[in-house]
Image: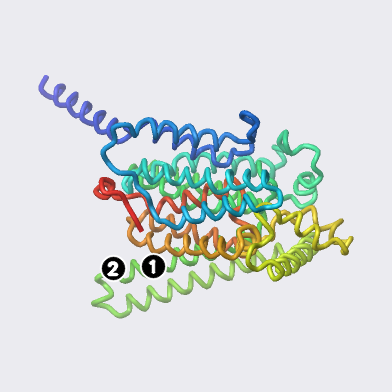
Amino acid sequence: MYKVCLLVKRELIAVKELKSKFKLSISQYLLLGSTFMIPFYIFRFSIWGIPTNVFEVTTIVTLVAFLIGCRGRTKPLVRGAIWPYLLLVLVVAIALKSPDQMQALGIAKGWFVVPFIYCWLVINNFHQHDVAKLALPILAATILISLWAIGQQMQIVTTAFYQNGDATFDQYLLENFRAFGPFESPNYLAMFLLPAFFISSLVFVEIKNKDKRLLASLLFAIPLIALYATESRGGFMALGVTAVLAFYLMTRRVCDCSNVMHRYSWYRWLCGVTQYGFLAGLAIFIMLMVYAIARDPSRLESDMARIEIYRYSWQMVRDNPIWGVGLGNYHTAIEEATRQFPLFRISVLPYALHPHNLVMALWLNLGIAGLAVFAIVVVSYFRRLRQTIDPLRWAGALAMISILVHGVVDTTYFKNDLSALFWLTVALAYVPKAEDASAGQKD
């Protein structure tokens, strides 16, 4: 009887600990749902004549629930750094000055204001010890998107209802055999998968069981397979750079923290040989993969078109160095700039929706001031990241580096899901420690 009572007592304690572990507020549960909805902005509709999507609606509902729950709150709100607020002010001011004011305000709402509200909600609802819970909905969404893309590569899944009738998607599937999932192109899929992959790695913080960790590790192979199915050279380049950096930092830390190296010089030598040998092999493998894809004759025309887009985009930067061309006005501006080049307008202009470079995209959309403030946001993010705990530091750094590296050859921000992932990555650096929450947080 005593053993039975002891067993029941242990079970009750375990259940109590489990409840306390998963006890979340309403706004936290809503944030988990909003996080899952990040890639599903594709489901759009209008409310009172205002275009919106499921991610924006869930984020605003979360904001309302959080503000209602703030009644009687004694702790001050966490502000974070001042630079994102300045960026929002600049974006709204530029939108009001843009040639197409309504379109620019819609872009400001979907790509800046709502994603920043989501970031602000994250840093005010989570702390460093529990923000890893957001990795689970990101992982679930990433797995779902990846399976969608893999199904396309295997010709099990075709285009979605909103993609039907567009010859570009049929060309990707039937001629180039590149997966794009629910997005507009394979490159957009790759731009989503990489930062989502690194943020999802925080799920291991929540999983303590070894068997479950092994299962989660196997799940992480699915986004990598989907990334391969995109055949995105920018995605492979970003993955290679972040993988090399991660392995370098990891092995350097292992070598430096080991007491063996203080007694045996051969241990340090062996660490160095292993480290740099693996890095060289990985770099060579990534370069060979990119080279193999680049040799595809179907890519030659695409590469030439991209070079032309770069050339005209840079010319527009030189012509409009201070103010840019206006938020959301890039396609119209490049159409005007190439009016006397009919070949470009016929074959390349439909694909020139962005400059295919993050710096030029920011410069042309937000002007030199917007580009400068955005750069300060990124720099202050890395400075702040050094004050966070290890899992957040690693996941946040790799996610941001993948965004920036891929941004050399693509526009890794100006899209609903990509901007939300960017601000979620920023939030990882500014979520407060539990003891800091009572005093707020500034930078």
Disc 2 marks which amino acid? Answer: Cys
Q: Nearer the viewer, residue 320 or 427?
A: 320
**Mark 2 surroundings within 10 Å by alpha-carbon count, few (fewer than 14), some (14 through 19), many (20 or more):** few
| Closer to the camera in the image, 112 or 206 | 112
**Measured from the top left, where is residue 382 in percent x and y?**
42, 62
Secondary structure found at label 1: helix
Q: Residue furthest left?
A: 2
Q: Which is more toward the observer, 268 or 238?
A: 238
Identify which residue is drawn at 74% across, 39% down: 163
Residue positioned 54% across, 70% down in the render: 281
Mark 2 lies on residue: 257
Q: Which corner quadrant holds the N terminus?
A: top left
User: Can I make out residue 321 in this image?
Assistant: yes
Category of crowding for the residue at label 1, using alpha-carbon neighbours closer than 10 angstroms: few (below 14), some (14–19), many (at least 20): some
* Amino acid beneath label 1: Thr
Residue 105 falls in which quadrant of the image? top right
Residue at 79 percent of width and 44 percent of height: 170
In this orientation, does residue 43 appear?
no
Residue 398 point in image, percent of width and height: 47, 59
- Percent position of residue 123, x then y: 38, 46
* SS for dot 2: helix
Instruction: Return the residue nearer the eye: 102 or 388.
Output: 102
